Every structure is written in structure tokens, then in C-alpha cells.
Amino acid sequence: MPDGLREAHVHLEELGAELGAINLDSCRSREECLDRIARRATEVPPGAWVLAVRARVEGWAERAWPTAAQLHEAAGGRPCAVKSFDIHSLVASDEALRVIGIEPGRPVDGRDARPTDSGADLDLIDLDESGVPTGLLLEAMAQRVLDAIPAPTADERLEQVRLACEDLARRGFVEAHDMWSRPTLWRDLADLHDAGRLPIRVLVHPVREDFDRAVAERDMFEREGVRLGGLKVFTDGTLNSRTAWMLEPYADPRPEAPAGRRMMTDDEFIDALARAEAARLPLVAHAIGDAAVRRRLDLIERHGSRAVAHRIEHAEFIDPADVPRFAALNVIASVQPCHLLPDIEALRRLTPDRLDRVLPLRDLVDAAARAGRDPADLIWFGSDAPVVDPSPEDNLQAAVHRRRRGMDEAEAVAPEQALTEAEAWSFMRAPAGVEAP
Ligand SMILES: [Zn+2]
């Protein structure tokens, strides 16, 4: 691994919060999970939450989640939740169920045990044979539990940000680009920097609501190790929720939006482009589907300046006609190949007819070279951690092999788009001259 890596898309506060939780990556059984919860519970005051993340129950000896009652006992009555690695489900302890209005141990019949505020979806609550919630909650119901966990105090938050930066530094990163950065983050980073406790350089990217404030506060928070990197906008949804905006409908479409949806009007995008350029910064646009990518390129072509290297984040699908436009328009494809690894099954299910358009890295490299550009200036790798691990090796694996370790070659997604190892590393290397502050 070369030194001096750049993580081009990460969420530091969220990564830090995960690092503060019990990490069940290496857990092999339900018993071990409960043991680790019981141990952590002795370290936190009564009433404080105990959170465990990245449970992969399929890999546990029992292949079964703990129950709400088992978590209650292990956590000594503290509210406790165990989050699945795919973040779409979690198990809540008795106390955590109560917090969101579900009475533990009683059957949910749609009336008396119904969560208090409206909008609860009974389909998302797992029930045992007598109709009693097991503790397992899905999607929006799982999110309710996460939303109920109190926000960290200022000191806890600072410590979490430091943990996240240290985790990245340990993996070889010297620069990280935080996305959807909030004012608390850039102030925390400046404090950490001044205290000599910031081991990497961080570029922050606020959304529109915070961007003007970031520009106004620039003189206050910018340091050698902390910079305002650009303006972040969201222009479509995500693949797994079938809301990424595609040129053609999904194989298993949502009736109300068969080809996903765009999340920003053209006027809003043009306005954001102008605001970013007025600050001489790039617009950093989340666009996952090929329709979203095309529209961003169209609008940058018509309204943007070539002098600023604007960015498209994710760009998971790119129509072949749009591939050369990145180099022609000086737009950076800021991609996360590592997502290919957990997404292979979802891609086959949702977009079986256009797997050849998934992350066309080979074509992007060749198009950049044909345009006389250094591909490393136009293709950047990141992880979107904590959605997945911020692992350079996973990005390498995905970019070079297009499939998970141990998978058969025939299972690779668009293997013709594979890169060499040297190419993959070049897209993770920090720009020359960047060293840890
Ligand atoms: Zn992200």
C-alpha cells in the first residue's frame, strides 16, 4: 500500500459514533454478542444507551437474533439496541421498545400496543407466534429507535470525531473529505487541530443550509489541516431503496417512481452551482443513477465553469455516452467501488439488464487518457463510511476483481471494467504535498 491516501467521501461524526459503539464485526455467536453487551453495560451509567453495530446474524452459530428480553437482561435494564451490518434492521431491548411506544411482552394487535405516534408500521415489527414483538424492527421502525438515542454531548462528539480521524490515519489516510458537514464539525476539527490532536487533513462539505455560514466562518476555522472543500447537494436517492434516478425503470420498480426520483430541480442545481463557484469551490453532487449523472453533466456543461473541478459523488451507473464527458467538462467522478462488494446481489436483482453500466472505471480511465488528462485527477475513491468500512483494501478488491473475495470469477459485475492494482491505488493517493498536519 502506498502511503498518503485520500478518503474522498466519509461521514466523520457518524463514523466516530460507530467507533464508540460495540463493533460486532468479529462476533461469532449470540452468546458472545450478549456477553459483550453485558461487559459494556458495566462501564456506562444506568439509563445510558448501549449500542452494538454491524451484527451479521447469518454468520453466528445460532443464526438467530437475541430477543428484547435477553438484551434487557444483558444490559442490566439500560436501553440497548443491536444494529444489523446492513443498517436496515435492529433488535431493541425491552427498554428501547418502550422508548418508541411499544410495550414489551404484550401482543401487538394493532390497537392498544400500537406505538403512540401515528405512522408506525406494524409490518416492520417482528412478532412471535403469540403476537408479541421479538425486539427485531425493520427499516423505519428501526430508525425510530436510532432517532431516540440522545445526541452526544459536546465533549463526546469531539472525542468521536477524533476517534474517526485516528481510525482513518491508522489505515494510511492523510486526507479525508467529510460530506454533509455541520458547523459543529468544522469547529471541532479546528479545536482538535489547535490542540495537536488532528492526525489527518480534513476538507468539509456542508449542504446548502450551512454553506453560507461556512463561507462566512472560513477565516475562523480554516487551518493547515481543516479546509472548506465544497458545497454538497443531493440530486437523487439510492440504489437499494430503488430511488436512484435511472434512465430506465428498475426490474422491480416502485409503482410511484419506476425509474427512481430526482431530488433537486434544475433551477436549484444551477443556483447551487453559482453559489459554489462564487466561493471558488466545487459543487459536490450526489448522483447515483445514470439519469441523475447525465442531468448533472448537462447542467454543468451549460452553466458551470471549467476552471472549477466540480464533483459527482457515487456515479454508480454511467451511460456509455456520458463517460467521456467527465474529462471533457473537468468533472471528477468521486466513486466508492467498495460498495460493489455488498451490493452485488441487489444489482443483479434491481438492474440485471444494465450491469455493464455499473461503475465503468476502465472506460473512465481510458476516456481521461484519450483527452490527455491524468486519470488520477478525475477519478477519486472513497468509502462513504460508516455505510461500509473505510477500507482501502476493499476499494482495491472491488476495482480490480469486481467481486467479493472468495467469489467465483463468473460472479464479477462488469469484469471488463476492472482496473490494475496500480491504477486503483493511484485513485486513493492524496495529492502531492499533503501530509498529516
Ligand atoms: Zn455519503
Image (spheres, rainbow, N blue to C red):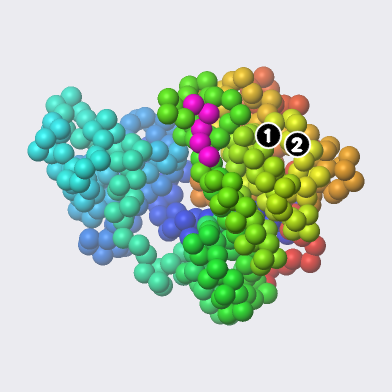
Task: Please say if 93 is above or below 318.
Answer: below
Q: Residues within 10 Å of mark 1 (few under 14, many from 20)?
A: many
Q: Identify the magenta region.
A: 258-262
For label 2, the residue is 323
Percent position of residue 215, x then y: 59, 71
Residue 306 position (above or below residue 255): below
The quadrant holding residue 88 is top left
Q: Quadrant of the C terminus?
A: bottom right
Mark 1 and mark 2 residues within 8 Å of each other at the beta carbon: yes
Residue 264 image position (x, y, % from top left): 53, 46
CA–CA distance between discs 1 and 2?
6 Å
Q: Main secondary structure of the magenta part?
A: loop
> Residue at the location (22% across, 60% down)?
47
**Residue 95's disc number:** none
Q: Residue 433 versus residue 353: which sits nearer the camera?
A: 353
What number is the disc on residue 318? Answer: 1
